[in-house]
Amino acid sequence: MINSTINTLLIANRGEIACRIIKTCKRLNIRTIAVYATPDIHALHVKEADVAYCIGSEKLQDSYLNIEKIITIAKKEQVDAIHPGYGFLSENALFSERCKAENIIFIGPSAQSIRAMAVKDEAKKIMEAAKVPTVPGKLDVQSVAEITEACQNIGFPVILKAACGGGGKGMRIVFDSKEIEEAARQAKQESQNAFGNDSLFVEKYLINARHIEVQIFRDSHGNCVHLFERDCSNQRRHQKVIEETPAIHLSQALKEQMYQSAIQAAHAIDYTGAGTIEFLVSQDHHFYFMEMNTRLQVEHPVTEMTTGLDLVEWQIKVAQGEALPLQQKNIKQIGHAIEARIYSEDPEQHFLPQTGKIKHLFYKDSQNVRLDSGIQRGDSIGIYFDPLLCKLIAWGENRDKAIHLLADALDHFKIIGIKNNISFLQSLLLSHAFAEGLDVQHLERNLSQYLCAAPTLSKEVLAAACLVFILNRNTADNTLWDKKNAFRINLKAQEMLLLEYQSQSIAIQITHTQTSLELSCPLFESIFEISGTVDDNILSYQFENSWRSISYFIENAQLSLIHQGHLYQLNDLAHIDHSTKTEQHDGNIIISPMPGMITKIWKKIGDSVNKGEKLLALEAMKMEHTVAAPKSGKIKNIHFNMGDQVIEGSELIEYDNI
Ligand code: ADP
């Protein structure tokens, strides 16, 4: 049994979770060693750690997944422990074993426990033996005939799952026997590609179920507690979007049963450390074990905010061989916490991951709101890693307060330079459906409802934009009263501004009075007036007899400003550097929407295609994206082969109109 103090800890991870772990280490006076891949040289986790080492290229096998390189640094720095975060090597039994062999504490469970839970169908068998309820199904079915027989016994709908699956990959829902063959082929192929194994099992597909998980902690002395549940039913493509605790609409009795089952599961595999038992809860309020994650979860902050505990600190204590810091009766849950995951993705383009440079970050610090972030201004977001940028978490005395606090935090949090899902999260969080409580299929069924068109330009926003552009022409003059250049003695100076909003040009006639701007624009009937000052990216202005202020960011005649929670982006067309604007492409050439690797090509030269038909698939940021035909035509040329890397804007396919 380990019984030693951790003084130096290596973090085998990146991004927000690496920064999160460093935070606790700083508080506990633990020296931190970061490792990084070359694209992360300027990353926040590299800056925040006491020491950082570059261990390889952007290829994960060369860096964040390279056990040898990580162990070499760990030995060089004589670290006492390695924290793997989540993802990467966190559920890698070999890594846990290797750390042990090198006398380094692995902050996580033993290789044996990881193995027990790594393969989903094996995990199900262990849970069944431990009397933990599991989803009815049939394990180890490989041929179409076996799967068909299993489906008939279980009853449709069913879900085919990859035994080694994870991250929503290798799963297919089947509604009738005609779909089995193709679904099995796809699930096997996806699983083989992602996990190098194509074993499947079948489960009853629970309609309108909820994903409820229980956080447990078990120490090496056999003590085990639960830290309540988290509701992670807000999912898109089986991936969590918003998580919260406590779960609503669940009786205390049901929750208690789930806590006890989770504890039983942990005992059954002699688990140590932080673990999460994921359950599905059916419409008729039965719960079933789905899988166990043998690591810290992305959504752990909601548990921390409602229990007041630091889960990373607990992980470190348990790894040092200490007993759990608290007994069950002393662990209390207070209030409600909700987390929103902010991704670099474009909801308008089927959530395609986005790359680019973070030009500016708007963030307002507020009480009971926590930002777990691994990004900073100036970072380049590439294709190599997960598109999760950061998480906003809010705590309230009750659910309503938590929702409103988180919505307010999202209103003030904006990332300039990379498309992201913030407005999608805002509309989801404030929806009637979210208030009522959602099941895991809700988002897929209703996705379009949460997609937000760009906000309409109001008089006020247009006036504020004009004022910012004018005041920023010469940064030395930051109030309208100081501005000399537009004034003429005894005359009101006039000028024309030509702005662009949502690809639309807007001409505004501006008259400078002694203290204000008078604006006239064909979009609005009457003349309107604004005055104000700018200071440190804040515009304070007077409009329609009241004073207000808004945050803005301006660069190269491109302005971003936040008004009532919406982000508006306007260009000053007379001053913009046109090379920074997106290029327009010929309609007969299909351009790569992102950098990535070509993983599938469905068509060949000479094929006729209909609008919407799949042409090829690109893999980037661990996700696969289909490029479909924007119109009907005939394939004239395909410029790449399977396995080729393409950059954003590469000409992929050329075709002729029919
Ligand atoms: P992964 O490990 O790939 O994330 P999980 O087994 O954790 O996969 O399942 C992810 C999600 O898929 C669940 O949260 C749920 O939304 C859905 N799901 C999985 N199994 C079922 C099932 N039997 N019935 C309904 N939905 C399911």
Image: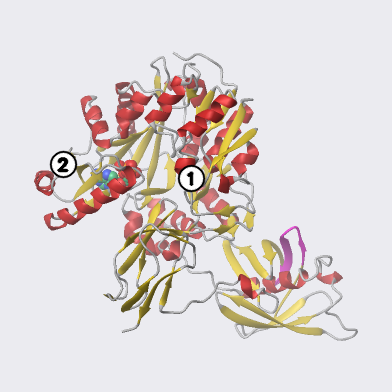
Could you say which is closer to the camera, residue 629 or residue 337? 629
651 or 619: nearer the viewer: 651
Q: Quadrant of the C terminus?
A: bottom left
The numbered dot on residue 141 is 2
Quote the CA–CA distance across marks 2 and 1. Answer: 37 Å
* Residue position marked by numbered label 1 in the rendering: 339
In percent of width and height, residue 606 lies at 29, 76
Nearer the observer, 257 or 223? 223
Contact (Cβ within 8 Å) of mark 2 with mark 1: no
Give the residue type that dot 1 points to: Glu
Image quadrant, ligand 1 = top left
Which residue: 60% across, 36% down?
Answer: 53
Direction from residue 174 to residue 615 in the image, left or right: right
**Protein image colouring:** secondary structure
Instruction: Find out whether residue 242 is within the magenta segment.
Output: no
**Left or right: where 34 falls relative to 557:** left
User: Closer to the camera, 70 or 631?
Assistant: 70
Residue 543, image x, y percentages: 70, 71
For the residue carrying disc 1, how many other residues have a C-alpha within 10 Å: few (<14), some (14-19), or many (20+)? many
Question: Circle 2 — which element?
Answer: loop
Above or below, 33 against 462 in this view is above
- Residue stretch rendered in magenta on the structure: 533-545
